[in-house]
Amino acid sequence: MVAQKEIYGGLVRLHVLHHASHEPIYGQGMMDELAHHGYRLGPGTLYPILHALERSGHLRSTVEKSGRSIRKTYVATAAGRKALVQAKQRVWELFTELFEDELAQGPRLRAAGSRKVANDKGKE
Ligand SMILES: [Zn+2]
């Protein structure tokens, strides 16, 4: 799990920045969203990430009160959105490198490639 955290940590941060640059996010909502993408992380993992992104100036938090419940929401700052734009360029480069063979094969074989990926996943 530790190794997985190290590999996916950057991807999780990019998901957070992406969503926080579109709308205010909050801890549980973000955990649900990440779970849809297959990242199972609890508050003990996500909250330190949110706090660190706030400390580094990429996110800004607001405390919302509705009745007796309090919810802390986060939005991306200008610096956070700028960092995301720069990261997207790198993600694109990584994507084209990771999928170099599939991209070179063209549409027909690319479809076959994605079926193969689906089969491999099924075997796990
Ligand atoms: Zn997402």
Image (cartoon, helix red, strand yellow):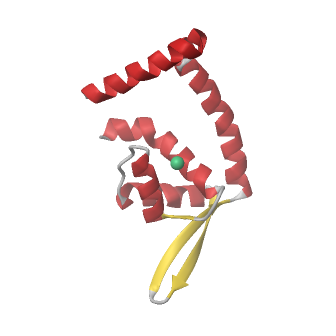
Q: Quadrant of the N terminus?
A: top left
Residue under the point 42% across and 35% down:
7
Residue under the point 35% across and 49% down:
40
Residue 117 position by quadrant: top left
Q: Is residue 84 left or right of residue 14?
A: right
Q: Is residue 118 left or right of residue 103?
A: left
Which residue ends up furthest to the left in the rendered image? 123
Q: Is residue 112 above or below residue 22?
A: above
Where in the figure is residue 6, as x and y percent of width and height?
Answer: 41, 38
Where in the figure is residue 121, as x and y percent of width and height?
Answer: 32, 28
Q: Is residue 98 left or right of residue 76?
A: left
Where in the figure is residue 52, as x and y percent of width and height?
Answer: 53, 56
Q: Quadrant of the C terminus?
A: top left
Q: Nearer the viewer, residue 34 or 47?
A: 34
Image mark count: 0
Q: Nearer the viewer, residue 48 or 62?
A: 62
Residue 38 position by quadrant: top left
Which residue ends up furthest to the front in the rendered image? 108
Where in the figure is residue 46, as x and y percent of width and height?
Answer: 43, 56
Q: Is residue 104 above or below residue 56?
A: above
Residue under the point 58% across and 60% down:
54
Q: Nearer the viewer, residue 35 or 74?
A: 35
Residue under the point 44% across and 60% down:
47
Residue 120 position by quadrant: top left
